[in-house]
């Protein structure tokens, strides 16, 4: 198996992070997963209205970058549920800080669901463990 060396714009950690999650939709998908969503239809129901072609693309990219995994839950037609990996769950504190920043600087923004600020990345991983359990 050939492993390609990533070709980033620079070695700046922020620039590299933006290669993974710097588009308009990736953090929305990660947010939804942190809030318990796991199926395509769940993501589509979010108030931001992500177009289906973009949602499919972002899920594929997030999987390719190791932030989530997918597992089929239905055979005909094949449908998948998505789970954050430890790498993806580690974005929770980033999301929490972005929400705090927005609340500080943007008047009249909404409130996150109860428990959002007290959640920890490890709280999100039981579904991942169950999805990757081979036994």
Image: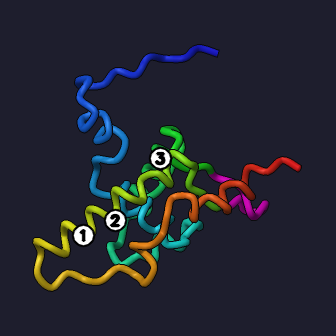
Which segment did they paint magenta? 70-80
Q: What is the x, y in percent for residue 45?
A: 45, 77
Measured along the vertical axis of the image, is residue 124 above or below residue 90? below
Q: Position of residue 118 (x, y in %)?
A: 44, 73
- Residue 62 got which mark? 3
Question: Which percent across, then down, holds residue 116?
Answer: 42, 74
* Drawn side of residue 78 relative to residue 118, left or right: right
- The N terminus appears in which quarter of the rendering? top right
Q: Which residue is mark 2?
A: 96
Q: Which mark is residue 7?
A: none
How far apart marks 1 and 3 lie (CA) works out to 24 Å
Which residue is depicted at the point 26% across and 62% down?
98
Which label's residue is closer to the chain start, 1 or 3?
A: 3
Query: Which element type, helix, strand or loop, lies under badge 3?
Result: helix
Task: Look at mark 1 in the image and give the residue it sits on.
Answer: 100
Q: Residues within 10 Å of mark 3 (few under 14, many from 20)?
A: many
Answer yes or no: do the residues labelled 2 and 1 have beta carbons within 8 Å?
yes
């Amino acid at each position: 198996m050939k492993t390609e060396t990533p070709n980033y714009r620079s070695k700046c950690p922020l620039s590299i992070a933006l290669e993974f999650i710097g588009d308009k939709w990736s953090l929305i998908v990660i947010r939804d997963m942190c809030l318990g969503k796991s199926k395509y239809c769940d993501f589509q129901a979010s108030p931001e209205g992500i177009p289906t072609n973009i949602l499919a693309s972002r899920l594929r990219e997030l999987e390719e970058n190791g932030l989530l995994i997918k597992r089929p839950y239905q055979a005909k037609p094949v449908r998948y549920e998505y789970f954050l990996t430890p790498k993806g769950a580690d974005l929770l504190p980033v999301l929490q800080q972005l929400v705090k920043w927005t609340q500080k600087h943007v008047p009249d923004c909404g409130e996150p669901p109860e428990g959002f600020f007290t959640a920890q990345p490890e709280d999100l991983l039981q579904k991942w463990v169950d999805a990757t359990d081979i036994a």
